[in-house]
Structure formats: C-alpha cells, structure tokens
C-alpha cells in the first residue's frame, strides 16, 4: 500500500495500480478504495465500482463515499443512497458531513 502511494507521487500510475491491486488482494480497505480512484480516473467505471464496493465492505468510509458518488453519477440513486448511508456507519465526521450533503441532493433529485 505504501509503495503504491510512492508510485503515485512519482507519477507511475501503472505501477501504483499494480501495487494497489496487490494491497486489495491482501484485503487492505484503502488499497481497494485507492485502486477504485485510479480505475475511475482511466474510465474503468465497472472496475472502480467493484473496488469501491470491496473497500466499503471492509469498512472504508472513503470507499463507501466514492461508491455513492459513482452510483449517483450513473443514475442509480437508490444504491447511491445506500452507499452514502454506509459512510455514516464508519465514523468519519468529515466524510459523514459530505455524505449527508450528498443524500440531501439525492432527495432533492427524487422530489423534482
């Protein structure tokens, strides 16, 4: 996981992705979440969604938030709401505030 971060800093995204894949396979929650970010950045939305799901299932608040954001962008508002609610369960105050704001936006979209 730490190697992947160093590779991102060195702008070696292919190497970072490979390192995050290894971290993800070892069950590292943030490894899966960060892998999702790289996959989403290069347009692999299905891969990013799967990585974010694994991160969220492992208790990673960032993974849950990113999953909710991706699902909302894809129009799956019900699943996005569920992902944003999982952020609340993770106990990260900053992400919880962001998730609450995202939920409020989703509710406005439903009302429109």
Image (cartoon, grey):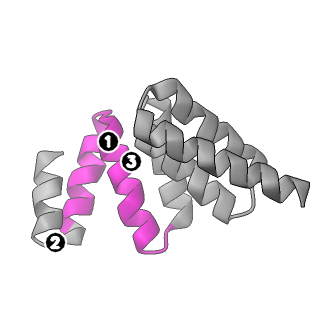
Picture coordinates of residue 96, whole percent (x, y): 50, 37
User: Which portion, as a residue range, is magenta?
Assistant: 15-44
Residue 12: image tag? 2
Q: Residues within 10 Å of mark 3 (few under 14, many from 20)?
A: many
The residue lying at 38 percent from left, 48 percent from top is 33
Label 1 element class: helix
Instruction: State the residue in front, 106 or 67.
Output: 106
Mark pair 3, 1: CA separation: 5 Å
Picture coordinates of residue 69, whole percent (x, y): 58, 56
Q: Find out whether the residues at labels 3 and 1 contact each other: C-beta distance under 8 Å.
A: yes
As drawn, is 6 to the left or to the right of 73?
A: left
Mark positioned earlier in the residue sequence (3 or 2): 2
Residue 70 quadrant: bottom right
Answer yes or no: is residue 55 visible: no
Mark positioned earlier in the residue sequence (2 or 1): 2
Residue 104: image tag? none
Mark closer to the observer (2, 1): 1
Picture coordinates of residue 3, whole percent (x, y): 11, 52
Label 1 belongs to which residue?
30
Answer yes or no: is residue 102 visible: yes
The residue lying at 42 percent from left, 44 percent from top is 62
Q: Residues within 10 Å of mark 2 (few under 14, many from 20)?
A: few
The residue lying at 70 percent from left, 43 percent from top is 81
Where 38 sits versus 43, above or below?
A: above
As drawn, is 103 to the left or to the right of 2?
A: right
| Residue 45 within the magenta-colored segment of the rendering | no
Label 3 belongs to which residue?
33
Instruction: State the residue in front, 89 or 31.
Output: 89
As drawn, is 11 to the left or to the right of 104?
A: left
Q: Quadrant of the N terminus?
A: top left
Q: Quadrant of the C terminus?
A: bottom right
């Amino acid at each position: 996981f730490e190697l992947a971060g160093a590779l991102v800093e060195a702008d070696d995204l292919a190497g970072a992705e490979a390192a995050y894949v290894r971290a993800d396979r070892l069950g590292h929650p943030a490894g899966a979440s960060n892998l999702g970010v790289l996959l989403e950045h290069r347009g692999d939305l299905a891969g990013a969604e799967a990585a974010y799901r694994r991160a969220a299932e492992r208790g990673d608040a960032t993974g849950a938030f990113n999953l909710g954001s991706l699902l909302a962008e894809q129009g799956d508002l019900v699943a996005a709401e569920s992902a944003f609610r999982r952020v609340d369960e993770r106990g990260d105050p900053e992400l919880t505030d962001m998730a609450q704001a995202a939920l409020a936006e989703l509710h406005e979209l439903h009302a429109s």
